Image (cartoon, grey):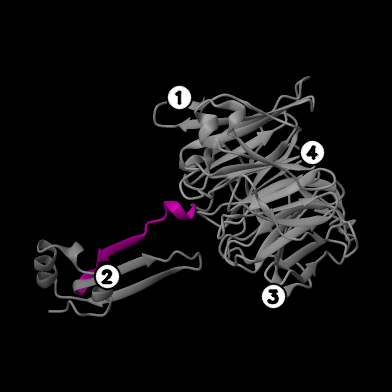
């Protein structure tokens, strides 16, 4: 979702699965108003399974991008959010596509090629849509997941690779992740847990930085696992995240700090994980938990793409009308993890014991670290530290400079000279 960029947010209301409403909200943090409705609710033909916000502008015709909804009646609806904000109601509907035979369970825009939209349904078909003309999207030939007419392995989730535009991954109801090359329209590889614990995937998400890594979540209550896989070591996962007591519902990777991963489960808990490269452990470390006031459980999570540390949690709610709710939270909402499930030798969950994890946010988020630092030492030495964008450490250089020369140099304007010149020693006297 790109809502906080404008800043706008959206929500879906499903009341008794009869009326589905789409709403757009404005986030006004600085004015103390919080979440403010922008425009009027728009009705949909059926309940939502997925809702995504793309950045495709179509020559300036859609300044706020395009909203796409995956609906239970097998269709995909496209809306113009700018018209929703303006209060134009049903006139905001751009097109409605009859996409699949059965509910559409998976939907996502391509970040690198915003005119491409991928969809997957319970019919097992993977479809790519070109929305160069959003009023009349062009479908490419469907890919049957099972290799048979109509397919049989329902697609539960899909995701485009954020680094390679033509690579896409799908998760199925049988616990298999398939990686596709959409240029060649061919299957690259399959990933599956050899112990048979991952029965049905609820979420598949690529690592924001490392193009060969992805995380998958299992919806089965007997094995509520998250696994991180590397395509270069596709025989087994490189890390497992054990913390939920019931099936995993969704997960979201923080783009500003890829070492932070959010997940929610049917146990009503939302867990913040430390999966940074420094934590070179087979098991991921939970560093925070959030579970208050979200009804039954969180069924969707999304980090803000522009506001570090801010995320949205959507819940169907536990009221008699099953009215939904969207909550905007920050990292300050997390408390120390409560429990950590113990797994038996056969890989299935058993009793729970107290977690030995560190206090919440024991590791500072990347965006809070200093981008650079410098200090003088004895003998005219200057130590310069620069934090790289990657999480594998920083670069440190030590120089020997005459103190009087440095003082005169600072008076002339230190910021006019590049750090590279300092590191190369060209500023010696």
Callout 4–callout 1 Cβ contact below 8 Å:
no
| Mark earlier in primary sequence (4, 1) | 1
Q: Please give the residue where the numbered disc 3 appears in the rendered image.
A: 232
**Around disc 3, counting alpha carbons within 10 Å, would you say few (fewer than 14), some (14 to 19), or many (20 or more)?**
few
| Mark earlier in primary sequence (1, 2) | 1
| Mark earlier in primary sequence (4, 2) | 4
- Dividing the picture into quadrants, the one containing residue 293 is top right
The span picked out in magenta is: 365-379
For residue 188, the mark is none
| Mark earlier in primary sequence (1, 3) | 1
Q: Please give the residue where the numbered disc 2 appears in the rendered image.
A: 419
Q: Please give the residue where the numbered disc 1 appears in the rendered image.
A: 33
Could you tell me which residue is drawn at 24 percent across and 68 percent down? 377
Mark-to-mark CA distance, 4 and 1: 34 Å
> Secondary structure beneath disc 3?
helix
Mark-to-mark CA distance, 1 and 2: 43 Å
| Mark earlier in primary sequence (2, 3) | 3
**Around disc 2, counting alpha carbons within 10 Å, would you say few (fewer than 14), some (14 to 19), or many (20 or more)?**
few
Which residue is more in the foreground, 345 or 198?
198
Q: Please give the residue where the numbered disc 4 appears in the rendered image.
A: 72
**Residue 380: image x %, image y %?**
19, 72
Asked if 13 appears above or below 149 in the picture, the reply is above
């Amino acid at each position: 979702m790109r809502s906080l960029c404008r800043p706008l947010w959206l929500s879906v209301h499903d009341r008794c699965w009869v009326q589905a409403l789409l709403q757009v909200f404005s986030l006004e943090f600085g004015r103390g108003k919080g979440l403010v409705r922008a425009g009027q609710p728009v009705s949909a033909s059926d309940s939502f399974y997925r809702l995504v916000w793309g950045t495709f502008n179509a020559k300036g015709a859609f300044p706020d991008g395009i909203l796409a909804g995956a609906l239970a009646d097998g269709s995909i609806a496209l809306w113009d959010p700018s018209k929703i904000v303006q209060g134009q109601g049903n006139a905001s509907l751009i097109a409605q596509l009859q996409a699949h035979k059965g509910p559409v369970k998976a939907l996502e825009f391509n970040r690198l090629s915003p005119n491409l939209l991928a969809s997957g349904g319970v019919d097992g078909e993977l479809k790519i849509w070109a929305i160069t003309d959003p009023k009349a999207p062009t479908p490419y030939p469907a890919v049957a997941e099972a290799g048979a007419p109509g397919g049989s392995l329902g697609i539960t989730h899909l995701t485009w690779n954020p680094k390679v535009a033509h690579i896409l991954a799908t998760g199925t109801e049988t616990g298999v992740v398939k990686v596709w090359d959409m240029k060649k329209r061919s299957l690259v590889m399959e990933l599956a847990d050899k112990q048979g614990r991952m029965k049905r995937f609820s979420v598949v998400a690529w690592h924001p930085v490392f193009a060969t890594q992805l995380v998958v979540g299992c919806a089965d209550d007997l094995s509520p696992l998250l696994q991180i896989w590397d395509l270069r070591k596709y025989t087994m996962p490189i890390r497992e995240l054990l913390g939920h007591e019931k099936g995993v519902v969704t997960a979201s990777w923080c783009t500003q700090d890829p070492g932070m991963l959010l997940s929610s489960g049917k146990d009503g808990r939302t867990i913040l994980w430390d999966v940074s490269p420094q934590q070179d452990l087979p098991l991921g470390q939970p560093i925070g938990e959030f579970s208050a006031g979200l009804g039954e459980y969180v069924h969707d999570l999304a980090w803000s793409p522009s506001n570090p540390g801010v995320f949205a949690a959507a819940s169907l709610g536990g009221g008699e009308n099953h009215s939904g709710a969207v909550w905007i939270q920050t990292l300050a909402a997390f408390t120390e993890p409560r429990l950590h499930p113990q797994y038996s030798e056969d890989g299935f969950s058993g009793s729970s014991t107290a977690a030995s994890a560190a206090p919440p946010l024991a590791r500072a988020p990347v965006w809070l670290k200093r981008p650079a630092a410098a200090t003088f030492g004895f003998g005219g030495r200057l130590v310069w530290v620069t934090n790289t964008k990657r999480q594998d450490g920083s670069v440190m250089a030590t120089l020997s400079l005459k103190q009087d020369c440095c003082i005169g140099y600072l008076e002339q304007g230190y910021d006019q000279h590049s750090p590279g010149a300092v590191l190369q020693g060209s500023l010696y006297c």
